Amino acid sequence: MNRFDVIVVGSGIVGLGAAYAAVRRGLRVAVVDRTEAPVGASIRNFGHLCIGAQTGEARRYADIARELWLRLSRDADFWLRPSGTLIAARHRDELKVLEAATRDGGELRMLEADELRRRAPLRADGLLGGALIPTDLQTNPRTAGAAIARHLATLGADFRWRTAVTGVRSGVVETTRGTLTAAQIVLAVNHDIDQLLPELAAQRGVMRCALDMMRVAVSLPTPLSAPLLTGWSLVRYGRFAALPEIDAVRARLHAERPDLAAIDLNQMYTQLPDGTLIIGDSHVGAVQPDPFQSEVAFDAFLDEAQALFDMPRPRVLERWQGVYAKGPGDFLIEQIDDGVLALAATTGIGMTTGLGLAEDSLTTAFGWESALEGTS
């Protein structure tokens, strides 16, 4: 059968979210992807679902996504924990940012240094305190996407793997394995939007952001109880980056460590169930990033990890390059033809917001009724 109600192009988290939204409404769904499993940005990240660090539109999508992540982890049987997020402050200006963030009446809670160290095995020297964002979640990005795809298949979604899309128009998706038809089509191909829709990508300023990451074996006295952010993270996430107090943090970090500023560091950490630590990450934007990875960023990751945690130097197990769509706004939502919707998270919060972006955008664009209450 090549006729469906909804065709989703792309099996990353936004595409899976679109397929999930459709199958929950009893629609016939096909998911088309040129690979044989999710292999892009949705598996090359920290697995950190940083809901409480978002604001505005991103926070709205993140809140929707949080409910869907919890539901999917139960139904699709993959690891996810309501971990919260820890933030370590090693300078007074970082504490001021965290204190300012608590004044909005949100869920952020300040932590004394001793309490933070009970939750994360950090060095005492230089640690002034920190905060906890209790709403946040953590998953294993290497297994979550595949588990969701398997679950969607059991719900009736038809996955067309190893099938490239060569063209899209209203009602029709042309592929390397034939023509598919549907009343509603969702393009969720992340940074490859410029391959299918080059004019739209150019018009919206979408390019690629490449980042370096690594997984390391560590000897920690106690496990890391939650994903951990630092001052370098505060300048990136909307809830903190919008505060006037962040200017002092940014200026100091760039003055003290221009080498880390040059790689656009987000110094953060998540610990997987096997005890290994994901650390990173650096950022560089380009239409086509250089595939060759310098050791500069990786050396910096290891140095900074050893300075922060009470542990010997980590042993590197894996290095990789992640790539995601980057644009002047956080999201691309564009109806490009009758019944054809292009979606992308054009910033580094796709795992946090992608399920919510898909659910909300399809509901609005296609006139669907909400399916968030009392469904599974």
Image: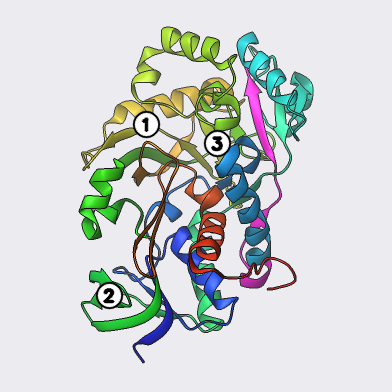
Residue on which the image places disc 1: 298
Please name the residue shown 59% across and 36% down the image.
Answer: 219
Nearest the camera: 265 or 168?
168
Residue 34 visible in image: yes
Q: Mark 2 and 1 residues: CB-CB less than 8 Å, in contact?
A: no
For discs 3 and 1, the disc positioned in front in the rendered view: 3
At a point 62% along the width and 16% down the height, the residue shown is 94
Q: Is residue 208 above or below residue 111?
A: below
Q: Amino acid at mark 1?
A: Phe
Residue 346: give x, y in percent of width and height. Answer: 40, 44
What numbered label is drawn on residue 163?
2
| Secondary element type, mark 3 | strand
Relative side of 273 to 181, left or right: right
Q: Is residue 75 magenta?
A: yes
Crowd tier of the residue under label 1, counting other residues whose Cα lies within 10 Å: few below 14, some 14–19, many 20 or above? many
Q: Quadrant of residue 189?
A: bottom left
Tag 1's secondary structure?
helix
**Residue identified by numbered label 3:** 269
The first of marks 2 and 1 along the sequence is: 2
